[in-house]
Image (tube, rainbow, N blue to C red):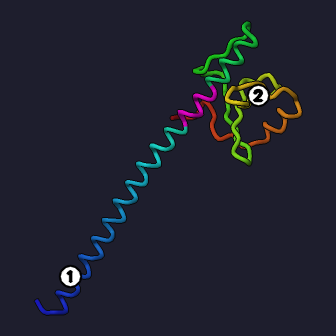
Amino acid sequence: MNEKEKAQNAKRANIMWVMMTLMILVVIAGIVGIIMKSHQTGQYKEMIRQSIVVYNKTDPEKTLSADSKTKVYRVRKSGDGEFFVQLNGTSPKFVYEKNHGKWSSVGTQKKANVVLKYRAVYTSNQQG
């Protein structure tokens, strides 16, 4: 084995180590991403659950369930990072915001219409 072959083998070994290191970093990043998404999904589900508890207190005849398979609930996010929950409809009694640590109805149809234009970041019928 001459010097040229030794140099080529060393170069190949370095490239293999770099490629393996990159693959390991990508796998670790993927695992961290999955864990973060799972945590965020749990937070969204909790927002929906808290809003449903408040709604059920205001309208006990038409109770909603957080794990309903037929009704779709949405968590919406405004441009400035504020979260809103849309329950079973588009009227103000179904659209909730968090004020001073408590969930409450947005109150007016005008405010509800604004909230409904925000991007839905979570829908209750999503997997996961």
Question: Could you say which is closer to the camera, residue 48 or residue 27?
Answer: 48
For image coordinates 70% across by 26% down, the residue present is 103
* Mark 1 residue type: Asn
Up the image or down, 6 lies above or below 15; here it is below
The residue mark sitting in front, 1 or 2, is: 2
Q: Residue 81: where, in percent of width, then height?
A: 69, 45
Q: Mark number for residue 9?
A: 1
Is residue 19 highlighted in magenta? Answer: no
Question: Could you say which is closer to the camera, residue 5 or residue 58?
Answer: 58
Residue span colored magenta: 41-48
Label 1, residues with CA under 10 Å away: few <14, some 14-19, many ≥20: few
Answer with left or right where residue 115 lies relative to residue 33: right
Q: Residue furthest left?
A: 1
Up the image or down, 113 lies above or below 59; here it is below
* Mark 2 residue type: Val
Up the image or down, 80 lies above or below 20; here it is above
Quarter holding residue 54: top right
Label 2, residues with CA under 10 Å away: few <14, some 14-19, many ≥20: many
| Residue under label 2 | 95
Quarter holding residue 105: top right
**Nearer-N-terminus badge (1/2):** 1
- Secondary structure category for the residue under label 2: strand
For image coordinates 47% across by 49% down, the residue present is 33
- Secondary structure category for the residue under label 1: helix
Quarter holding residue 2: bottom left
Answer with left or right where residue 67 lies relative to residue 5: right
Q: Residue 127: where, in percent of width, then height?
A: 53, 34
For image coordinates 71% across by 30% down, the residue present is 100
